[in-house]
Image: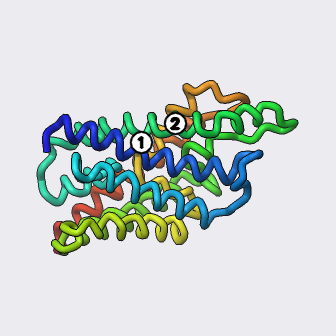
Amino acid sequence: MSNGDIFVGEIIGTAILILFGTGVVAAVLLNYSKAKDAGWVVITFGWGFGVLAGAYTAAPLSGGHLNPAVTIGIAVDTGDWDKVPVYIAGQMVGAVLGAVLCWLVYFAQFQANAEEEIAQPTLGIFSTTPAIRNPVANLVTEIIATMGLVLPILAFGLTKGLGESGTSILIVSFLVVGIGLSLGGPTGYAINPARDLGPRIAHALLPIPNKGTSDWSYAWIPVAGPLIGGVLAGLVFKAAF
């Protein structure tokens, strides 16, 4: 895979992932949405389908990592770091782009938010926020949840038939749903630095009425936690398999 293919593939795939993911949260949270109050299960499946669509689209060009933690976990296992910066750059650009597309899709709902007597905070649509703000506990949650993503992804690669048939992407999509259902309660399961940081940047820059804070004091946790989790998953996989 050339650097150009990887960069473009990760931009497109990550943009699709974030469009679907932030889109389902917007659908559930924003007033005047037909999916208003559909609930957590809908959100977890929306993110899972985002992984499905994004990874299948990007796979022919880049392999469909869509996540710096996955990219780094693979690099720790293989020792090949040459293309890591290209992957992460594409993922970050795609994450910002996907968040902007979500804003455009729900533009009328975001505008209507400005007319509410009590405006809804919008950051939770774009990025993660903890249910209980405890930096140590939040960081540990993100580390463990990311290991629960990256370690199985590395193990799936041991079964050649999964990769050749493309079934591994489908399984990873369900894995993301499972992580959301089981481990997403404390922090909203970023498990992907680009997924959180890219949309947070978009939230800070977009002209969203009454959008509230972008909460930069918390932003390091959904970046550091998944990166640490990706490294640990790569080390455990290399040692055990």
Query: Is the residue marked by circle 2 packed among few (<14), some (14-19), or many (20+) residues within 10 Å?
Result: some
Query: x and y percent of residue 208 in the render?
Result: 65, 29
Question: In the rendering, at what x and y percent does residue 54 appear?
Answer: 38, 51
From this view, report whether residue 129 is shown above or below residue 112: below
Q: Residue at x 58, y 34 (%)?
A: 104
Tag of residue 113: none
Disc 2, SS? helix
Q: Give the camera-side residue of 181 and 79.
A: 181
- Here the colouring is rainbow
CA gap, disc 2 to disc 1?
8 Å
Residue 212 visible in the shown view: no
Query: Which callout, 2 or 1, points at the residue further toward the start of the chain?
Result: 1
Q: Is residue 70 above or below residue 102?
A: below
Instruction: Please tell me which residue is depicted at 63% across the width and 63% down the height of the picture.
Output: 40
The residue at 55%/47% (across/down) is 22
The amino acid sitting under disc 2 is Leu
Q: In the figure, residue 211 lies in which quadrant?
A: top right
Label disc, if present, on residue 101 of the rendered structure: 2
Q: Position of residue 2 (x, y in %)?
A: 13, 39
Asked if labels 1 and 2 touch by Cβ distance under 8 angstroms, the answer is yes
Reading the image, the residue beneath label 1 is 15
Q: Please, what is the three-letter code of the amino acid marked with disc 1? A: Ala
